[in-house]
Image (cartoon, rainbow, N blue to C red):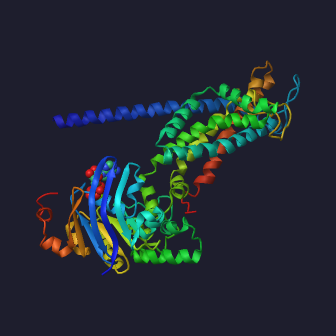
Amino acid sequence: MATAVEVHDLKAWFGKTEALHGINMAVEAKHATAVIGPSGCGKSTFIRCLNRMHETNPEAKSEGTVRVGGVDVYEMPAVDVRRRVGMVFQKPNPFPTMTIYDNVAAGLKLNGTHNRKILDDIVEHSLQQAALWDEVKDILKKQSGASLSGGQQQRLCIARALAVSPEVMLMDEPASALDPISTAKIEDLIFELKQKLTIVIVTHNMQQASRVAEFTGFFLMGNLIEFDKTEKIFTNPSDKRTEDYITGRFG
Amino acid sequence: MPNRNISLRRQMTDYFFTGLAASLSVIVVSALIAILAYLVLRGAGSLNLSFLTQTPKPVGETGGGMANALLGSVMILGIASLFGVPVGIGAGIYLAEYGRNRLGQLVRFTSDVLNGVPSIVIGLVAYGLVVLPQRHFSAFAGGVALAIMMIPTVARTTEEMLLLVPHAVREAAFGIGIPQWRTTISITLPTARAGIITGVMLAFARVAGETAPLMFTAFGNQFWSFSANQPIAALPLQIFTYAITPYDDWHRQAWAGALMLVILIVGTTTLVRFVFMRRMLGGAR
Ligand SMILES: Nc1ncnc2c1ncn2[C@@H]1O[C@H](COP(=O)(O)OP(=O)(O)O)[C@@H](O)[C@H]1O
Ligand SMILES: [Mg+2]
C-alpha cells in the first residue's frame, strides 16, 4: 500500500474566510478516493489545493503541506505540479477554438513537444484511455472539441488531462452535468484509469462514490469528519454526522 | 374569456415592439445607404483611371488624380497599425489578465480619457514628439498621430473581448500545466480573436478618415513620395484641400476621393476578416 498524495494540516482561505480548517489525509496510490459532503463544505477547495489550482484565484491563500509522490508541491513550480496532478472539472471545458486533436495535444504542444509521431501516438493513446477514440477517430482534425456532445466533451477533457501523463487525476463532480449513460461511461473509465493512476473524485452522488471508490472522505464545513474505506463509511460510519449525512438527514 | 384577452394583448405588445425595433434598424441602415449612395452618385463618375494613376495638376488645369494621396493613406495607416495594434493589444492583455490593481485602473482611466481627446490635439502631440525634433513633416509623424488614436480603442476592446472568454477556458489550460503567458497567447487570445479583430478594424476605420491630426504631421504633398521620412499626401487631406476650392473639377475629385476612402476602409476590413476568420478552427501553436 503506497501513498500517492499526503495532506498535512491543510488550511485554505478565500480572502479572510477560512474554507478549510486543517485537513489530514493520505490518498492511496492507484485507487480511487471519493470526497463527499454537502454543498459549500470545501470539497472543491480541497482538491484544488492538491494541484495548486486554488492559488489561481487572486483572493486565495493556503497553508500546510501537500506531498505528491513524496515531494512537497510548494517546492515545485506550479505548472509542474499540475502536469503531475491532472484535473477534470464539473463542466466540460474543451478549448473552443481547437480541433479534437489539438485539444488533446495542447498540454504537450504548448510545452514544447512538436514531434508529429510522438503527438499522434499520445493523442491516440489518450483518447483510447478515455474511451473516446472510436467515436472521434475520423473527425480528429476536422471538428472542434466544442462540437461534441456533453459526455464526449467530458471524456475529451479526460483525454486532454491524460495526455501529459499525470500520476494523480482530480475530478470535481465530473458527471454531475451529464446524462445517465454518459455518467456510466465516466464511471467505467474511472475503473480502468485507477489501474494506472490515482484518482480523487468529488461527488454529490453517494451511489457513485460507493461504486467507484475504495476510500471515501466526508467533509463538513471545512473539516474532514471521517475518512475510511468506502464500505465502512456507508455501512458503519464512526461519526454521528457522517451517518446523518449518508442517511439523508441533512445536506 | 379573460385568458384569451391577456394573450391577445401580449401578442399585440410583442408585435408593436418587434415592429418598433425593426423600423429603427431600417432608419440606421437607410442613413448608411443614403450616404453611400450619394457618395457613389457624386464620386463614381470621376473615379477613373487617371484619378487612380496621376498626381494633382497645378491650379487652373483640369484632370490629374489622387494616386499619391491613396498611396500616402495606405502608408500612414500601415505605420499607424504597425505601432497602434501591437501596443493596443498588449495593453488590453495586461488589463484583462493582470490589471486588477492600481496600475490597471490608471491605464484604464488614461485610455478612456485619451479616447476622448480631440484628434487635433493628438496631431499637435505628434507634431511636438516627431515633427519638431526632426524639423520636418513626415508620413512617419502622421502614422504616430493615428497610432496614438488607435491605441485606446484597441486596448479597451481587447480587454473586453478577453474578459468575455469564460474563466473555465483558462482553468482548463492551467489545469494541464500551461503557464499563464502561454495560455494568454495560445488559448485566450485565439478564443477572443473575432472580437479583437472587430475592435482593431473599428479603430482603423475611425482613424482612416482623420484629417486634422495629419495637417501638421504628414502635411500633404502634391507629388509622389515613397518615403516615410518625407511629407506625404493623404486622401482626407487632399479631399479637404480640393473641397474648399472654387473649382468644379476639384469638387468632383474630392467626391471621388471620399468614395475612394470608403472603398479603402471597406476593402481592408473585408480582406482582414477574410484572412483571419477563414480558419476559425486554429490549432495549438
Ligand atoms: N471563489 C470563491 N470566493 C470566495 N469564497 C469561495 C469561493 N469558492 C468557494 N468559496 C467558499 O468556500 C467554501 C467552500 O466552497 P467549495 O470548496 O466550492 O465547496 P464545495 O465544492 O464542497 O461545494 C464555501 O463556503 C464557499 O462559499
Ligand atoms: Mg464544488
Q: Is residue A41 above or below residue B252?
A: below
Task: Report whether B63 appears left or right of A234.
Answer: right
Res A56 quadrant in image: bottom left
Q: Nearer the viewer, residue B270 or B18?
A: B270
* Residue under the point 38% across and 35% down: B18
| Residue B269, position as x, y percentages in the image | 63, 44
- Residue B227 in view (yes/no): yes
| Residue B91, position as x, y percentages in the image | 57, 43
Q: Is residue A177 above or below residue B268?
A: below
Residue farthest to the top, as pictured: B246
Task: Report whether A40 appears left or right of B198.
Answer: left
- Residue A89 in view (yes/no): no
| Residue A83, position as x, y percentages in the image | 45, 68
Within the displayed image, which quadrant is ligand 2 positioned in?
A: bottom left
Q: Nearer the viewer, residue A99 or A246?
A: A246
Marks counted in the figure total: 0
Q: Which quadrant of the figure contains the C terminus of chain A? A: bottom left
| Residue A245, position as x, y percentages in the image | 14, 62
Q: Which quadrant of the figure contains the N terminus of chain A? A: bottom left
Q: Is residue B190 above or below residue B136?
A: below
Q: Nearer the viewer, residue A94 or A202?
A: A202
Q: Nearer the viewer, residue A85 or A103?
A: A85
Q: Is residue A70 above or below residue A172?
A: below
Res B119 quadrant in image: top right
